Amino acid sequence: MTGYFLQAFIYLVAAVIAVPLAKRFGLGSVLGYLIAGVVIGPVIGLVGEETSVIQHFAEFGVVMMLFVVGLELEPKMLWGMRHRLMGLGGLQVVLTAVAVMAVAIWLEFQWSIALTVGLVFALSSTAIVLQTFNEKGLGKTEGGRNAFSVLLFQDIAVIPMLAFIPLLALPDLVDKAQLVATSAAQQHDEISLVAGLPSWAYAMVITAAITGLVVGGHYLSRPLFRFVASSGLREIFTATALMLVIGIAALMSLVGLSPALGTFLAGVILANSEFRHELESNIDPFKGLLLGLFFITVGAGIDFAILWQQLGIILLLTLGLMLLKALVLLILSVVFKIRKSDRWLFALSLAQAGEFGFVLLSFSVQNHVLPTEMVQTLSLVVAISMFLTPGLFIAFEKLIEPRYRVAKSERKADDIDELGTVIIAGMGRFGQVVNRLLTANGVKTVVLDHDISQIDVLRKINIKSYFGDASRADLLHTAGIEEASLLVVSMDNPDSATEVVKYVKKTYPQVKVLARAFDRGHAYMLRSAGADYIQKETLLSALELGADAMRCLGFHPFHVEQQKNIFRRVEKRSSDVLYQAWCDDSSGERFDNNYRKLFIELEETIKQEMVKDRSDKHATSERGWTPPPKGYDEILEGEEPIDSIPTIADGRITP
């Protein structure tokens, strides 16, 4: 027992030190885990022979990851992916396997060995790629979505590969059906439901298992989770989630199918469940730790003795494999019209071999398809290609993506052929609302934005807009800033927005400038730059939502409207004092102690104003309110009677 504790401690210490350091240097957590494994394994020898055993256990992290991925995919979405899943994924596996096979035959290997190596190397690392996509937010890009389709097809393709590879070791295929069933049993040392079954019975068992999973997941999971949730015990819900994943993985193993594929299917079935997010949050910590452990074992499992003996050959094979896979993926990206930086993301992210390669290599040795010496070398090729993958992502981020960004920003600005009364700089979600309101009232606007994809979207919905950087003086001149009445600044970059305000108020003081501020600090900067009217982007919407919250709590709508106006009025009245405190600071700390003191006083003022009796002091804006009719309180379901409208006293709601 002491030995297990020590081993666990060593793995955890390595992860705790290496992963934060790798993240700090921008290398990503996957590379951190791999480096940790190399250090505690081949470098200082703290771990060794037990690595392969732990790796089999840690592969369950991949199973959990596929379950979580399935939870995020509704069946409808998966059906929508079918063309890319089968077309892109299928072609990638076939073309890569054929290309690797051709190279192996050229190197004078037997065709059966060449084909097996081709199938092994056709697979990529689902664990590394999806984990990196999640960390870097690349999963929603076009390149990320297409890469996911390919990875999903590869995971499915492992099943027929496991059935097909043993046939390559046999000259006679008369007993093919029997071997398919036997092969499924041989990959699991424990209990099997399909060992020795004829092919027709094997097919029936598979069908029954998949059908049971789908039907059970759809009809039984909800009552089960409701029953467990009613206990109010979070740990039992976690145990139920683990029970579900482990049970499905065990069922798939018993019938000779991939546990990862089974849990993925279960995740898809539960994607529409109301317990989806709870399941995801419960599984996620286990998934992350097991995946990390898996990466550590990959690093620790690198055999440096063989590596040094065959360093040149292994590096040549690794780099050749990654180059060949990237080339195949680039060709497919052209065929499937994946464009710009997404094309490179797609090609580079899948250029490595994958963790299922270890499984297939081990399986090939067991079935006398590949010699053991060759498998040791090929395992190093798989491991090193996985080790190099984070470097490819870094190359994409640092070298390729910036080049496309620069190319985009260097595009010549559009020719502005129609001027207007108002110029709107920045057409994000804020600028669009302003533009719609103005144009709906017959005001002519000139819309500028430096995001070409945003411009393309606006043009598709018949909003006339021009590509160009509004911080450029020549573009503002072309847009007719001299003749414009108003300039609305709603640019995403706060610094650029402030510079535009400063330039326009200095050069064209007759033009009124209305600006969107991100927060209080940005509002002060815009005011200092000379903006005539400033609106904080979330203030009004937050105020409205707060008012809705009060109404839901039972406050009368008239009372809510009053309190909302008081809040806004006090906030506005205090803004000059706070702005002056922000400007007066000489130490460089804008929000200093004096400012904080004034802000706290503002909060107290708001509270005091809220509890004042204003029954006889209605503002002009409130005179349009009509008193509620008799029986109003009976109409509103769940409302308190008007006579007992809640008020705030001493910071508490009292009837």
Image (cartoon, rainbow, N blue to C red):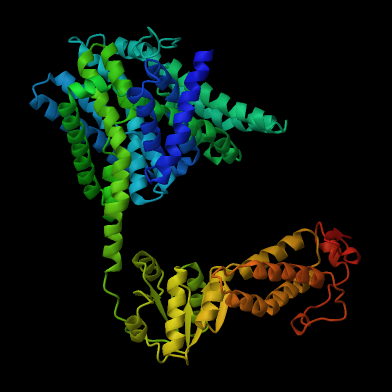
27 relative position to 273: left or right: left
Q: Quadrant of the N terminus?
A: top right
Q: Position of residue 282 (x, y in %)?
A: 58, 34
Q: Where 365 sits versus 648, above or below?
A: above
Residue drawn where x is 85% and y is 73% of the image: 612
Residue drawn where x is 47% and y is 91% of the image: 509
Q: Where 26 sits versus 424, above or below?
A: above
Seen as rendered, the residue at the extreme front is: 587
Residue 399 versus residue 618: which sits nearer the camera? 399
Corner quadrant of residue 576: bottom right
Residue 137 versus residue 500: which sits nearer the camera? 500
Q: Position of residue 590 (x, y in %)?
A: 57, 70
Residue drawn where x is 27% and y is 35% of the image: 352
Q: Position of residue 70 (x, y in %)?
A: 47, 36
Q: How many marks?
A: 0
Q: Where 419 sits versus 19, above or below?
A: below
Q: Quadrant of the C terminus?
A: bottom right
Corner quadrant of residue 391: top left
Residue drawn where x is 30% and y is 25% of the image: 357
318 relative position to 12: left or right: left
Q: Position of residue 472 (x, y in %)?
A: 35, 78
**Taking the image as drawn, is residue 197 in sight?**
yes
